[in-house]
Image (spheres, helix red, strand yellow):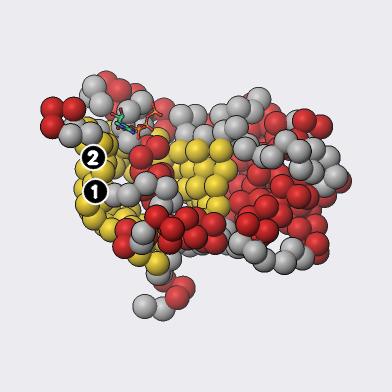
Amino acid sequence: MDEAVVPALRMDRVSKEYGRGSGRVRALDSVDLRVERGSFVAVMGPSGSGKSTLLQCAAGLDEVSDGTVHIGRIPVSGLDETQRAMLRRDRVGFVFQSYNLLAGLTAAQNIEVPVRLAGGRVDPVVVRDLASRVGVEDLLRRRPHEMSGGQRQRVALARALVTEPEIVFGDEPTGALDTGSARQVLALMRELVHRDGRTIVMVTHDPVAAAHADRVLFLADGRIVDEATSPSVDGVLRRMARLEAAGC
Ligand SMILES: Nc1ncnc2c1ncn2[C@@H]1O[C@H](COP(=O)(O)OP(=O)(O)OP(=O)(O)O)[C@@H](O)[C@H]1O
């Protein structure tokens, strides 16, 4: 297949079950998903619908019970735990609600962490360019407690991008930010996708955040039950209300 058309993420009939016997929960139920390179996808759904499970299975953090996951050309579902850890380190970026920056390190050192973990050499020009791309070039010597939440999340985005990953997964990346900072970080994420060709998949409860994505997937009971392309906030709210009314 032509490299340009290989999706960043492909999930084919992925199911995930937790527990055994009467305590068994089917958290994902035969999910098919393709995320094209250079796209921004949001995942929404009621509590317990399987959003975190989807992210964890897609990112190789958890094993699937059935089906296959590919990150680019790599079949994640065929890898053992060590190989999955290497895949996450080299091909996947993560941003979390709580930033997860290392408190004792400066912003520059935090951005460098994934490269150092991989045993690579850090090119200071790459770090500076990335910092400038996310708007923290003047904060590189600061430690996390000397930065605002929005600034920390920008540093976390730079850290997620420093290995040039195939895809970045976000788990409520703006969940801890005030409205203004959240919008700025979301606008930055859109730019990283549309100007720089990065690929982002983000789980969110926030319809405003979801409306920044190119595509919103709606999960209910472990299945993708609806999808919206370039939706408005109202469009997302309407679909969520429909899901809640259906008792999902
Ligand atoms: N480690 C686990 N062991 C057992 N059941 C689990 C585990 N993790 C998740 N589940 C169950 O799987 C289902 C999906 O959970 P998941 O956390 O993926 O939902 P979610 O949509 O992310 O929810 P929320 O919005 O509340 O974070 C739920 O029924 C949950 O109780």
> Who's the residue at 22% across and 52% down the image?
66
> Who's the residue at 77% across and 65% down the image?
123
> Does 27 sit above or below residue 7?
above
Secondary-structure class at tag 1: loop
> Who's the residue at 40% across and 37% down the image?
52
Q: Quadrant of the N terminus?
A: bottom left
Nearer the observer, 188 or 236 = 188
- The answer to the question of whether label 1 and label 2 lie on touching residues, with beta carbons closer than 8 A, is yes
Hey, which residue is sitting farthest front in the picture?
82
> Does 28 sit above or below residue 79?
above
Looking at the rendered structure, which numbered label has been put on residue 17? 2
Nearer the observer, 179 or 25 = 25
Nearer the observer, 106 or 222 = 106
Left or right: residue 42 versus residue 77 is right
Residue picked out by circle 1: 65
The image quadrant of residue 118 is bottom right
Near mark 1 (Cα within 10 A), the count class, few <14, some 14-19 or many ≥20, is: some
Hey, which residue is sitting farthest bottom in the picture?
2
> Does 207 sit above or below residue 215?
above
Hey, which residue is sitting farthest left in the picture?
21
Looking at the rendered structure, which numbered label has been put on residue 121? none
The x and y percentages for residue 179 are: 64, 26
The x and y percentages for residue 235 are: 41, 33
Left or right: residue 119 versus residue 74 is right
> Who's the residue at 82% across and 47% down the image?
140
**Which callout, 1 or 2, points at the residue further toward the start of the chain?**
2
Near mark 2 (Cα within 10 A), the count class, few <14, some 14-19 or many ≥20, is: some
